[in-house]
Image (cartoon, helix red, strand yellow):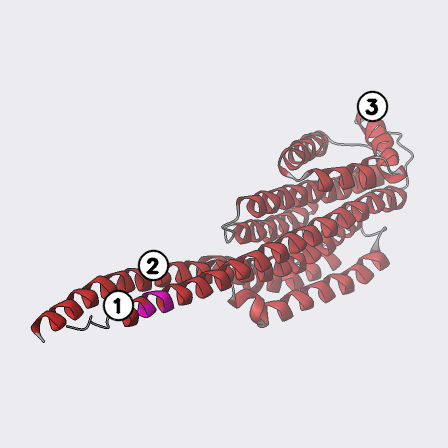
Amino acid sequence: MAPSQDFKGRITILTVVPLIVVLIFAYFLISEGYRQVKNVESLEKGIVLSTKISAVVHELQKERGRSAGFLGSGGKEFKEELKEQRLLTDRAISELKSAVDREYLAALPEETKRVIERVISDELNSISEVRNKVDKREISLKDAVSFYTRLNNELIDAIGEIAKVSDNASVARELTAYADFLYAKEKMGLERAILSVAFSRDKFDLPLFKKFVNLLAQQKAFIKSFELVASGNVVSYYRKTVLSSDPAREVARLEKLALSVPFEGGFNVDPNYWFGVITKKIDLMKRVEDYISRDLLSKVEVIKGETKGKLIMVVVLSALSIVVVLGVRLTMGKSPEG
């Protein structure tokens, strides 16, 4: 009996130790796999939320342009267009708040949630007061444009916060490119407002001209950064959709005209015509923006499938390893006769 018991004791030690090791490795591998799956799911919801944020930015850009044209013309231009635009902005804000009230925001890290909640609760809720001042022309053109610009920048910054959620380097780069593209589009929207004023007045003053030139430089810088980071298919789609378009060529012509005789004036450009042309170009930018978000969601969907597949494989292999170790224990646990 003693040799048999001694044999069984050694077998128990030889099998229990590997079993414990397998269980420890299985725990860490499964925990890491589960964490990666949850990270990808959070990222997916974050990207959906970012599309809602960018939709608000798009409408705020148009509202800023209409507001600037209204104030810059002394209330003579853009009055009805501004009213219509505010309805579109309110609709986009409502959709964003609905997304925040659902599970999209809850899936993000606490710091990211705080940034987005602050922008939505503190900044977007103050828009009614600014609109009232614009209607009564109790706010300067500079202050009105600054309000919308600051609000848009904070919303785009919130999208940048979502990029921090990603553990995947490729997706993180694409989100960075997405943010760069949104910043370029934001500067273009600001240019729309600035030239609406210049064409309404039929000339620049020095501060307005400096702002215009600076905006052109910033757009160029953000687009260059976007093209360096974005995937090839996204850059190709941007060049095909925007750069080769008629609105882009007409915007370039009007920009050249504005640069040629900034202080002499005599542009003879209807501000509504300018607004319409550059809005067509910005709408094409929005089409590219939507393409980028779809591309991102498609990539994340693939990554999510791969991550879940790896997790399932780890669970199965861990279970098989445990079964093998226990099987060896049962087989070897039978002591030899005599």
Residue 25: mark in rendering: 2
SS of the residue under disc 2: helix
Residue 13 rendering spot, x and y as whole percentages: 19, 64
Instruction: Determine the CA span between mark 3 and mark 2.
Output: 70 Å
Residue depicted at 72% across the width and 38% down the height: 235
- The residue at which mark 1 appears reads as 332
Sort mark 3 into few (<14), some (14-19) or many (20+) by Cα contacts within 10 Å: few
Q: In this view, does 26 lie to the left or right of 99?
A: left
- The residue at which mark 3 appears reads as 260
Q: In this view, does 51 lie to the left or right of 330?
A: right
| Tag in front: 2 or 1 | 1
SS of the residue under disc 3: helix
The amino acid marked with disc number 3 is: Ser
Residue depicted at 70% across the width and 60% down the height: 131
Magenta residues span 323-327
Above or below 71: residue 329: below
Q: Quadrant of the C terminus?
A: bottom left
The amino acid marked with disc number 2 is: Phe
The amino acid marked with disc number 1 is: Met
